[in-house]
Amino acid sequence: MTGRPATGDPQARAPSLLIVEDDWFIATDIRAIATEAGYLVVAMASSADEAVAAALAHRPDLALLDIRLVGERDGIDAALEIRRHLETAILMVTAHEDEALRRRLAPAAPRGWLLKPFSQPQLLAAIKAALEPCAATP
Amino acid sequence: MSDPSDFQRLFDLDQDPAFIVGPDGRVERANAAARSVLGQDPRGADLASFVPGDGTQLALFLDRCSGTRRPLPAAFALKAADGEARRLQWQGVLLSPGTATLPPRLLLRCRRRGVEEFSILGRKIEELNREVGQRRRLQVELVEALAQKDMLVRELQHRVKNHTQMLMGMFREAGRKGESAELERFIETTLTRLHAIGTAESYMYRMLEWQGIDARELIPGLCQAIAASWPEHAAIAVAADDVELRNDQAVPLALILHELLANALRHGLKFGPGRVDVKLQREGPRASLTVEDSGTGATIPEAERAHGGLALIRGLCRQLGGVFSVDRQPHTRCIITWCSGAEAGAV
């Protein structure tokens, strides 16, 4: 894992997040909720290519990915490619859910699958659960 | 079989047209089937006059048959009485070699039945092929139409969910400005109501049962989603009977449940942790939803009664064609009853 867990230790930094979402309103809302909760949003991306480039540049602890993105490739393509290079945890935040998508994503070993529409507590609970195996929450 | 009439009777038993002819094609005998096809007795006539063409091919065939006792095949048409030339399969064989006084005789037999039956069978097969082809094309069109419908439904799902999320994001953004406590409260209430609507919508699409929704899945799912939106968690116990809801009942019921749970969590359990029981019961055509908290039953402010959640509950209850009642002793217990599923239309 690239990020260090945030603990009571003042030297530890907050877990870093990459938000991959093509809808600007939703992306900024997720960023605001996460930032208010103390997470460090290191980048936002609206396409798979941007997502992979941002992940390689910032090595976030967690990537929150929508499935539908701008461009040819979707969020699952992005998640699979990110996981080929990094240990970044994957949390899908999407309106889609079916067995075929879950099977496609399986090699990326996602830590969660949050369905839209979600509430603020549900988003924070999903982020916390996705980071739990390796890091404490802020 | 020295009697020629015995031979003719035997000859007539054959269902296929047959001729006994000389090597020159002169007809000595024709059986009943041949006479029936030709519409006349061709005895003494030249067989070539009943076969379309210049007779060359027939003459060659007769010549070949004259030299063998093994049946030889051929295909000639025969001019029938109705004027139609019927394509037949022929077999020719030397019946008796010639003598000093008698010329050789040939037996020619036409396999009418086989050819015609094959022809009918062929036509039937062609018709069946055409029908199978049409059905396959129809099936392909139906599969394509279903796939397109599935794609449209998925697209609709995606848009509804995303737009609900987008609206929630916009309200949250407005709430972040923190202009007043009243505005924050309004936004928070709107957000949780929108979330309840979105959750009900997602259950409707998940089930893809356009005629009805199984409340046994919807109610626990809604309770879970609503409870997760409240920071002050309370134990919520859900028991749901098998109740079918129409699609147009799901959203009002989700909002009612949201308001009842919100009241229970906000007011009923105001003075300490407790438990909320949610029961969905079916009694014949009617269904009832009960939300009961274990709290001390704090009074809901008058303004909220008139314009807030309770007013919403009463309005939505009317929309469902239901009845709303509240019992406050010893704990607050709210009950709505309505006609579920298809019976609701009678209300």
Image: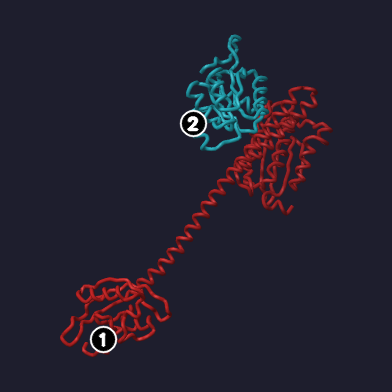
Chain colours: A cyan, B red
Say whether residue A18 is left or right of residue B73: right
Looking at this view, is B205 or A50 the one in front? A50
Task: Please say if the residues under marks 1 and 2 sit with CB atoms less than 8 Å apart.
Answer: no
Q: Where is residue B79? Give x, y as percent.
A: 38, 78
Q: Where is residue A29? Give x, y as percent.
A: 67, 26
Chain label for disc 2: A
Q: Looking at numbered disc 2 in the image, what kind of residue is underneath it? A: Ala
Q: Where is residue B327? Give x, y as percent.
A: 76, 39
Question: Label for residue A31?
Answer: none
Secondary structure of the residue carrying tag 2 is helix
Q: Looking at numbered disc 1 in the image, what kind of residue is underneath it? A: Phe
The residue at the far top in this view is A11
Q: Quadrant of the N terminus of chain B?
A: bottom left
Say whether residue B193 is left or right of residue A13: right
Q: Is residue B129 above or below residue B265?
A: below
Read off the residue under disc 2. A106
Residue at left offset 61%, top offset 26%: A125
Whether residue B284 is visible to the viewer of this picture, yes or no, is: no
Label 2 environment density (alpha carbons within 10 Å; few <14, some 14–19, many ≥20): few
Residue at left offset 28%, top offset 74%: B91
Q: Is residue B259 above or below residue A79?
A: below
Read off the residue under disc 1. B7
Secondary structure of the residue carrying tag 1 is helix
Quarter occupied by residue B111: bottom left
Chain label for disc 1: B
Quarter occupied by residue B165: top right
